[in-house]
Image (cartoon, rainbow, N blue to C red):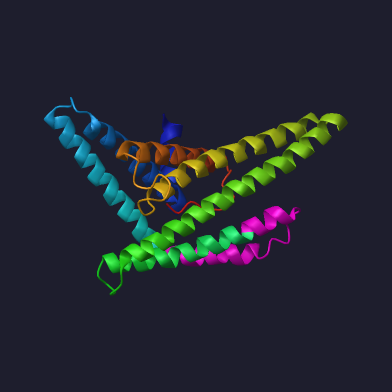
Amino acid sequence: MQQSMESLVQLLESYRGRDKAIRTVCYGSQLVGGVLTQKAEADVSSQRLGKSLLLFSAQLSHCRTVLRLFDDLSMLAYSHSYGFGASEEDAGVRWISVLTNVADQLYYPCEHVAWAADAELIKARSDKWWLFSTVLWGTSLLLGILRSLRILVLLKRKLKKYERDGGDRRRSQLCRQMRGELLSILSSTADLSNAVHWMPPGFLWAGRFPSWLVGLLGTISSLIGLIQMNAGGSEQSESSPQ
């Protein structure tokens, strides 16, 4: 119990850890609130609780948007340190990563303008800038899925090589890496599904998800993010802004 409490405190003391915790609570509240408000047979108190949880989720989402006002420099520092990925062995992984960094870097100013327009700090149409930011987020997620798939192909080739040559320790390490990439694909796919839902009506399944499904997909993605952070599996701290 003491160790669990210390781990939680340590998580909340870091900015990235706190953001992931808020994200998990945000989507979890949307999941439970969506389920409670969806039930036709639910009593008045359950309906009221469900609506309160949805409002709480919306406030936490707004909180994360405000906190991301300060993420541009950290993203820029990461993009600068990665550069054109000269350290990457595979050209496909390198260029996908570069494009992902570009999409992530452009995402933040678009979201900032949308937020400022909603707050009436500037005169602009916020819906247009929210659309830009959602498209960039979805692009980043799609590129992340492609990157993980490419890495999985490369890891499978290495795994076959080590199966022939022996080396149990190296095989075990490769299997752990493959599981990590599979989790990343699952997480990004869940987020990408929500990104499409937030696109303008008429685009694929845009606007068709009930609140509980958005919450479920976001909760799955958030829990995977916490697992990866705990395992030291987060390679890019600025990824998955939403």
Task: Count every numbered label the image shows and give the total.
Answer: 0
Magenta-colored segment: predominant secondary structure: helix
Residue 238 in sight: no
Magenta stretch contains residue 150 = no
- The structure residue drawn at horizontal position 18% and vertical position 24%, both measured from the top left corner, is 41
Q: State the image quarter where residue 157 is shown.
A: top right
- The structure residue drawn at horizontal position 36% and vertical position 68%, both measured from the top left corner, is 113
For the record, the magenta segment spans 70-97
- The structure residue drawn at horizontal position 42% and vertical position 60%, both measured from the top left corner, is 133
- The structure residue drawn at horizontal position 64% and vertical position 56%, both measured from the top left corner, is 96
x and y percent of residue 208 in the render?
Answer: 34, 42
The answer to which of 193 and 6 lies nearer the viewer is: 193
x and y percent of residue 207 in the render?
Answer: 34, 46
x and y percent of residue 80 in the render?
Answer: 61, 67
In this image, 53 relative to 221: left or right? left
Q: State the image quarter where residue 211 is shown.
A: top left
x and y percent of residue 193 in the render?
Answer: 45, 44
Q: Is residue 105 above or below residue 59?
A: below
In this image, 136 relative to 90: left or right? left
Q: State the image quarter where residue 40 is shown.
A: top left
Q: Is residue 167 above or below residue 88?
A: above
Farthest residue, direction right: 165
Farthest residue, direction left: 44
Image quarter in which the N terminus is found: top left
In this image, 105 relative to 209: left or right? right
Magenta stretch contains residue 75 = yes
